[in-house]
Amino acid sequence: DTAVSQTPKYLVTQMGNDKSIKCEQNLGHDTMYWYKQDSKKFLKIMFSYNNKELIINETVPNRFSPKSPDKAHLNLHINSLELGDSAVYFCASSQHDRGQGGYTFGSGTRLTVV
Amino acid sequence: AQTVTQSQPEMSVQEAETVTLSCTYDTSESDYYLFWYKQPPSRQMILVIRQEAYKQQNATENRFSVNFQKAAKSFSLKISDSQLGDAAMYFCAYKGGSEKLVFGKGTKLTVNP
């Protein structure tokens, strides 16, 4: 059983399109995250949800919209894709009151915008 | 804002030898957690080891251990008896009260047979 699963693993799309990445966790965690890893491997947080409530919203273009239908799911929708959006996007989860726990990451979605 | 610095973009080690990866961080918080993550070519992020700042004892996990120097804000990772499977990107990360995991830029470790 995969703890944090993301779909799709690879996504190739044209500029201007709209796409979504889905994430599900079966760990019972109450907090979920989206991270972006750029071409230089730098990981930066984009969003975080705790029990369906947005708690972290970094400086991200408003073309990116997270949606959390329940605490086990956090999806990322991207409108009007640009070349610079090409990256690996990681979903992760953690339990808020268990501060010593690190995050559990999904396997990432490699997005390529052409 | 907290920052994490990994000053070694790349490191290499001979199989069976020991290597130390450096990490420093900047924070004004007194209670926080530090982590090392491994990212092999498969790109999966794997938690290697964690350290609570209030614990003076350095964390160890089999061949992996840390040297945590709180006053110096230093958190290095030592890999003993290096194996070919240890080759990966290693990321140091900080988590304070904001729930946000802040990463360093990573160190690429090569293990030579």
Image (cartoon, coloured by chain):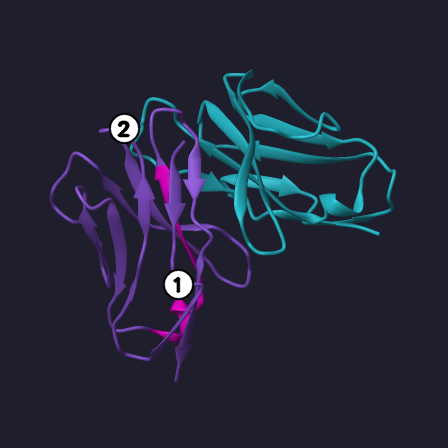
Chain colours: A cyan, B purple
Judged from this view, the residue extending furthest toward the left is B56
Q: Quadrant of residue A57?
A: top right
In this view, the residue in front, A107 or A53, is A53
Give the magenta range.
B83-94
Reply above or below: A65 against A90.
Answer: above
Residue visible at 25% across and 49% down?
A: B74
Q: Position of residue B49 (x, y in %)?
A: 30, 50
Reply above or below: A94 against B66.
Answer: above
Secondary structure beneath dot 2 equals loop
Q: Which mark is residue A71?
A: none
Tag 2: residue type? Answer: Glu
Q: Which residue is mark 2?
A: B29
Residue B19 within the magenta-colored segment of the rendering: no
Residue visible at 55% across and 60% down?
A: B42
In this view, the residue in front, B95 or B64, is B95
Residue visible at 31% across and 73% down?
A: B82
Quadrant into which the N terminus of chain B falls: top left
10 Å crowding of disc 1: few (<14), some (14-19), many (20+): some
Quadrant into which the C terminus of chain B falls: bottom left
Tag 1: residue type? Answer: Gln
Q: Quadrant of residue B30?
A: top left
Of the numbered discs 2 and 1, the one sitting upstream in the chain is: 1
- What is the chain identity of the residue bearing mark 1? B
Judged from this view, the residue extending furthest toward the bottom is B113
Q: Which residue is mark 1?
A: B8
Residue B89 within the magenta-colored segment of the rendering: yes
Q: Position of residue B58 (x, y in %)?
A: 16, 49
